[in-house]
Image: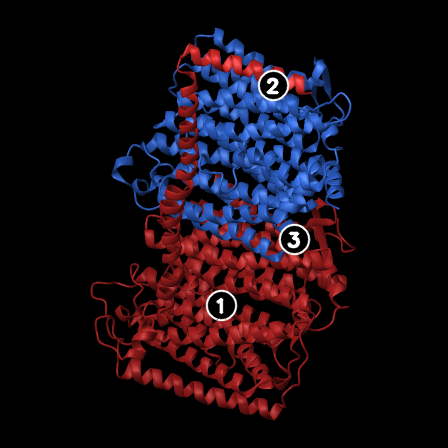
Chain colours: A red, B blue
């Protein structure tokens, strides 16, 4: 079943264990008591992580770059041969380690967070199903297996956003997420079909081998990459298909951490990085990605400035960070994009879990205007949240600094305007993150009657582990400026072909870092002055704002625009087609045929009303005609 | 001989049911009969496809009673005999009038459908085609719901009108055959009719099938009929009878009037794709669960019709695959609609909601079947739709795009319906609603196993279809 590396079949267990966990917790959801489901689910993902680690070393020791594990022929007819196969290489291993590693921590955290929910067993079943799908997505050896995982994670996202299904608003958010993802998926599947017709295969290895012979800018490749991009835009919540992600915060907070921050939403970045060879052939598409990524990063960050729901701030921040990753991809720096996926998985998962810890402590309250002063009540949550905030803001030497700095320097290599936008967005990010931190943890407690307390160990230990990763995760990929050798990027080189670009000089790079650090410190100080010293609390919804503020608070009215432009007309069209076209035109048209028939019937009936002399006349006439007919022949 | 046995078992058992008085006995005997038939059909799958049965029938017209099968008829036969045990079971434990008669009619319908799919000449095909209508007509008329008389009449006249065209077409083809005339399909396919004739003959033959499927704008009989029909009636109609249209079109049009098919190809594809969008859009805001499922069925069948006319081997295999997948999925969906009605007394969605609280397992199974319907990967629906869209793509990327819209529109209307029925807070009126009973699992779980099984491992179906697919792709060139 495998190439030459022994025991590589173990890879099958990586998705199989969460699947097994899903089946156990799902089928026995009425019988499992207390924390049993959580423990089973966590063990399943934990074991997957251990096996992934083992696979990592096995592949390294084998001296090979990749291994394929084929299970069976999924669809085989005519020229089409699509095996159910896994590809274990440096890119998929990186993603597997993130998914199972961060996933395990989030599963364990959820045991504490979801404790007492009466559908906790279903929750863990769905979390395991998600992990299984996400692993299929990154392990698939061809686009169609990737697509199974791709749609599978979309389903789990739908289920978990609408987990508290009694609330209609949550159900609406869940449907919205699924439908917007599906819009992307149609583009994606058409891209896969075009790949099939172009290369007579959907498997990565065959397509990429053949693509090497194609010319840069070939129209068919441009079309393919654009179609795949539509899928990535939907899944990774980029403009114009991003509005589902902030609404997705309706799900339990661990879901936001796992699905809507660390893993699923990065699937689009994974897929484009996986297809790097194709994208390198399509400069037009790369430019489109730059525009989409940069616009999304800035736009979402601006909206993040005015959000007052702790999870909404993080959600817009996620959209914005995903935009950064797209920017990296568009610049041809795929491994940098994947590196930002990795550090983002650490610090954003940590931010969400920290937010969950806060929400847990505040008895479900999510409005940061009602929080404050939690620093002393929840020291572990505070310290870990601070670490993550520093990381996302890009303060050296925290993990986000390394990944973001690499994206900034790539932007500078490309175009100074791009650099300014990217830097500006980083500063906005820093401001809204510290605004959040100060409002939640500093100052006086603003909610009377609340008795916040630190979360139990089962929740804080994952926070601590993630904070270690958020702080030191950047050391995986130290640039030469600091004496490193970009080990993370180099590791990915065998799977991802990044575009080479002119390196900026070390002097420029030092100047660049110096500039951003100074500006970041100014921003942090400014935020401190505003929200701690002057203790400004964002005004309530009733207070009058300037038009610009109002537009930002209302997220540029994009939701309203979409509703007016698409959702409402679609509903009206549906009613119109049924009530007018179907019921007044098409249906009666058929009845009309029936009426005409019955009128004809009336007519013919007149010939048969029992008038014997008419019958006799008709009979004689008939015979005469018959005789004439015979004689004339 | 085995083909004759498969045809006669339901017919003879069905008539013998009239001698039973007890409802339970009649149902059990009917179930045994359908299960035996299913087992016989499964045993056929491994046999080579040269098994035929032929007997002298109407000699002076050159018409024989000949049965046979190929890849397409195997799938049709499989679908029919797979679904009927569940159709019979759907009656178990339910309060129905005149149970022996009802089951007799169900089995007669099964026999007639088997006859349609096995017939080797057009005359026999036509006899069974019309014969199938009679038991279904009575099932609808006697066991149906509100407004059944008017709706059944419309259904009956509509399909009968289509059949008349078909009959005319068959007679026309018959008199074209050389020598002592025949209605054998094999003879029809060797006629080499001039192109001009094929162009009008195409519609004469197609209209009956277009109504049966149905494709836009010949569909108006369908939603009211599905809504009014009893659960068993609609399982037969939507699960199997719509496939008669697809089967007929494949049997008559492509081999007999290939030039006519080529001439009208794009028009029919566009009509079908309009049907896909039209039905999907209506399904979104529609308030009745059963009618909503009816429109979703029409959308799926329309996509299959479009795929049929692109004359592409992938689309073709996807289409036949989807015949099986759609039949199983739609039957399961309608059965669920029946359960919803039993628990709440209504299928009007604005009055429904929160059923998941009392019936969590029903909600889960509903969701799985619904996912099959919206073609999530690893369900049978995905394999079929992926192949059909692949086929449409070869003709035109726009066809593929409009066909692909079912992926979005299906998610829109199905999830909205799911929310309106299952999710949200509990309605006081349904406080007494209960979850699935043992019988419901016996019906739904096997159907789900088929939906998932074929989605994960579709290869056996492709193996059955392989020889026909080769012939078909040869035809296309």
Which residue is identified by label 2? Answer: B36
Residue A239: percent from left, percent from top:
47, 69
In the figure, is residue A553 to the left or right of B414? left
* Residue B319 position within the rendered picture, expressed as x and y whole percent measured from the top left: 62, 41
Instruction: Depth check: give the residue in front, A581 or A219.
Output: A581
Going from N to C along the chain, the mark reached first, 3 or 2, is 2
Crowdedness of circle 3 by 10 Å Cα count: few (<14), some, many (20+)? some
Same subunit, labels 3 and 2: the answer reads: yes
Pick the front one: A599 or B177: A599
- Subunit under mark 1: A
Q: Which residue is drawn at 28% across and 35% down?
A: B431
Left or right side of B465 for A160: left
> Which is more foreground, mark 1 or mark 3?
3
Instruction: Find out whether the residues at labels 3 and 2 contact each other: C-beta distance under 8 Å.
Output: no
A612 left or right of B258 in image: left
The residue wearing badge 3 is B395
Q: Which chain carries label 2?
A: B
Secondary structure type for disc 2 = helix
- Distance from label 3 to label 2 (Cα)? 43 Å
Q: Name the residue under label 1.
A: A238
Note whether B64 is above or below A93 in the view shown: above
**Same chain for the residues at labels 1 and 3, yes or no?**
no
Choose between A15 and A32: the one closer to the eye: A15
């Amino acid at each position: 079943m495998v190439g030459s590396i022994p025991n590589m079949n173990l890879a099958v267990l990586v998705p199989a264990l969460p699947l097994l966990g899903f089946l156990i917790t799902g089928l026995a959801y009425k019988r499992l008591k207390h924390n049993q489901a959580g423990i089973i689910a966590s063990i399943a993902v934990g074991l997957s992580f251990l096996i992934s680690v083992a696979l990592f070393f096995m592949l390294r020791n084998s001296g090979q770059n990749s291994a394929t594990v084929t299970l069976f022929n999924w669809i085989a007819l005519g020229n089409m041969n699509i095996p159910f196969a896994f590809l274990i290489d440096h890119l998929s291993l990186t993603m597997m380690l993130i998914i199972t590693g961060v996933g395990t921590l989030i599963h364990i955290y959820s045991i504490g967070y979801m404790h007492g929910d009466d559908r906790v067993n279903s929750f863990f079943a769905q979390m395991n199903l998600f992990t299984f799908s996400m692993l299929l997505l990154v392990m698939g050896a061809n686009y169609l297996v990737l697509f199974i995982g791709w749609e599978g994670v979309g389903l789990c996202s739908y289920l978990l956003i609408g987990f508290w299904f009694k609330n209609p608003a949550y159900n609406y958010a869940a449907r919205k997420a699924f439908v917007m993802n599906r819009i992307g998926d149609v583009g994606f599947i058409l891209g896969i079909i075009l790949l099939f017709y172009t290369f007579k295969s959907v498997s990565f290895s065959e397509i990429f081998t053949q693509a090497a012979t194609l010319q840069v800018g070939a129209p068919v490749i441009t079309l393919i990459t654009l179609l795949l991009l539509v899928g990535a835009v939907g899944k990774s919540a980029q403009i114009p298909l991003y509005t589902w992600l902030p609404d997705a915060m309706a799900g339990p907070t661990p879901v936001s951490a796992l699905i809507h921050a660390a893993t699923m939403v990065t699937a689009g970045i994974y897929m484009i990085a996986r297809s790097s060879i194709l994208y390198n052939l399509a400069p037009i598409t790369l430019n489109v990605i730059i525009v989409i990524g940069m616009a999304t990063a800035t736009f979402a960050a601006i909206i993040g400035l005015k959000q007052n729901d702790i999870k909404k701030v993080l959600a817009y921040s996620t959209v914005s960070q995903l935009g950064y990753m797209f920017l990296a991809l568009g610049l041809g720096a795929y491994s940098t994009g994947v590196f930002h996926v990795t550090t983002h998985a650490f610090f954003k998962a940590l931010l969400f879990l920290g937010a969950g810890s806060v929400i847990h402590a505040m008895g479900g309250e999510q409005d940061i205007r009602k929080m404050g002063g939690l620093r002393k009540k929840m020291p572990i949550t505070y310290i870990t949240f601070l670490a993550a905030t520093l990381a996302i803001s890009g303060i050296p030497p925290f993990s986000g600094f390394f990944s973001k700095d690499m994206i900034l320097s790539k932007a500078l290599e490309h175009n100074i305007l791009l650099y300014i936008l990217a830097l500006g967005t980083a500063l906005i990010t820093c401001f809204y993150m510290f605004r959040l931190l100060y409002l939640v943890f500093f100052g006086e407690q603003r909610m009377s009657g609340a008795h916040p307390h630190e979360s139990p160990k089962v929740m804080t230990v994952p926070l601590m582990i993630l904070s270690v990763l958020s702080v030191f995760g950047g050391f995986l990929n130290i640039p030469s400026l600091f004496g490193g050798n970009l080990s993370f990027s180099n590791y990915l080189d065998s799977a991802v072909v990044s575009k080479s670009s002119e390196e900026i000089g070390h002097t420029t790079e030092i100047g660049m870092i110096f500039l951003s650090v100074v500006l970041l410190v100014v921003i942090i100080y400014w935020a401190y002055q505003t929200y701690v010293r002057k203790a400004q609390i964002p005004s309530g919804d009733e207070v009058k704002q300037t038009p610009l503020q109002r537009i930002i608070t209302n997220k540029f009215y994009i939701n309203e625009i979409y509703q007016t432009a698409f959702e409402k007309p679609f509903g009206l069209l549906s009613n119109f087609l049924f009530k007018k076209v179907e019921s007044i035109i098409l249906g009666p048209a058929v009845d009309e045929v029936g009426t005409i028939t019955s009128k004809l019937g009336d007519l013919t009936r007149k010939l048969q009303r029992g008038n014997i002399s008419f019958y006799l006349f008709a009979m004689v006439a008939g015979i005469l005609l018959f005789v004439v007919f015979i004689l004339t022949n | 001989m085995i083909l004759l046995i498969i045809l006669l078992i339901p017919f003879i058992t069905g008539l013998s049911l009239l001698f039973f008085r007890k409802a339970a006995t009649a149902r059990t005997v009917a179930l045994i009969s359908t299960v035996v038939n299913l087992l016989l059909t499964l045993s056929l799958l491994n046999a080579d496809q040269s098994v035929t049965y032929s007997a002298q029938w109407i000699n002076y017209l050159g018409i024989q009673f000949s049965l046979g099968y190929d890849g397409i008829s195997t799938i049709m036969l499989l679908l029919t005999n797979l679904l009927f045990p569940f159709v019979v079971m759907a009656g178990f434990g339910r309060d129905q009038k005149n149970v022996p008669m009802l089951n007799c009619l169900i089995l007669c319908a099964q026999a007639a459908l088997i006859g349609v799919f096995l017939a080797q000449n057009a005359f026999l095909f036509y006899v069974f085609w019309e014969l199938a209508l009679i038991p279904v007509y009575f099932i609808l008329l006697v066991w149906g719901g509100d407004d059944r008389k008017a709706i059944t009449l419309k259904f009956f006249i509509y399909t009968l009108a289509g059949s008349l065209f078909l009959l005319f077409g068959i007679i026309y083809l018959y008199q074209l055959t050389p020598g002592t005339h025949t209605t054998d399909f094999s003879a029809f396919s060797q006629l080499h009719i001039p192109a001009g004739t094929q162009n009008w003959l195409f519609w004469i033959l197609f209209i009956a099938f277009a109504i049966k499927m149905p494709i836009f704008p010949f569909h108006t009989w369908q939603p009211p009929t599905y809504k009014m029909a009893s659960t068993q009636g609609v399982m037969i109609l939507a699960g199997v009878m719509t496939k008669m249209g697809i089967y007929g079109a494949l049997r008559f049009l492509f081999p007999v009037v290939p030039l006519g098919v080529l001439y009208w190809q794009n028009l029919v594809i566009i009509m079908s794709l309009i049907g896909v969008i039209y039905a999907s859009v209506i399904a979104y805001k529609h308030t009745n669960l059963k009618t909503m499922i009816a429109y979703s069925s029409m959308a799926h069948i329309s996509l299959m019709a479009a795929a049929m006319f692109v004359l592409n081997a992938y689309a073709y295999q996807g289409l036949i695959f989807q015949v099986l997948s759609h039949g199983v999925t739609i039957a399961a969906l309608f059965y669920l609609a029946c359960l919803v009605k039993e628990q709440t007394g209504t299928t009007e969605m604005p009055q429904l909601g929160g059923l998941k609280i009392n019936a969590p397992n029903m909600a889960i199974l509903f969701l799985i079947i619904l996912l099959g319907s919206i073609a999530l990967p690893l369900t049978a629906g995905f394999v079929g739709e992926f192949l059909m869209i692949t086929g449409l793509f070869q003709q035109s990327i726009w066809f593929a795009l409009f066909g692909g819209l079912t992926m979005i529109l299906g998610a829109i209307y199905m999830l909205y319906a799911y929310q309106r029925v299952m999710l949200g807070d509990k309605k006081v009126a349904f406080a007494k609603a209960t979850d699935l009973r043992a019988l419901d699992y016996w019906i739904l779980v096997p159907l789900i196993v088929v939906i998932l099984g074929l989605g994960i491992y579709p290869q056996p179906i492709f193996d059955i279809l392989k020889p026909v697919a080769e012939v078909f792709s040869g035809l296309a060139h």
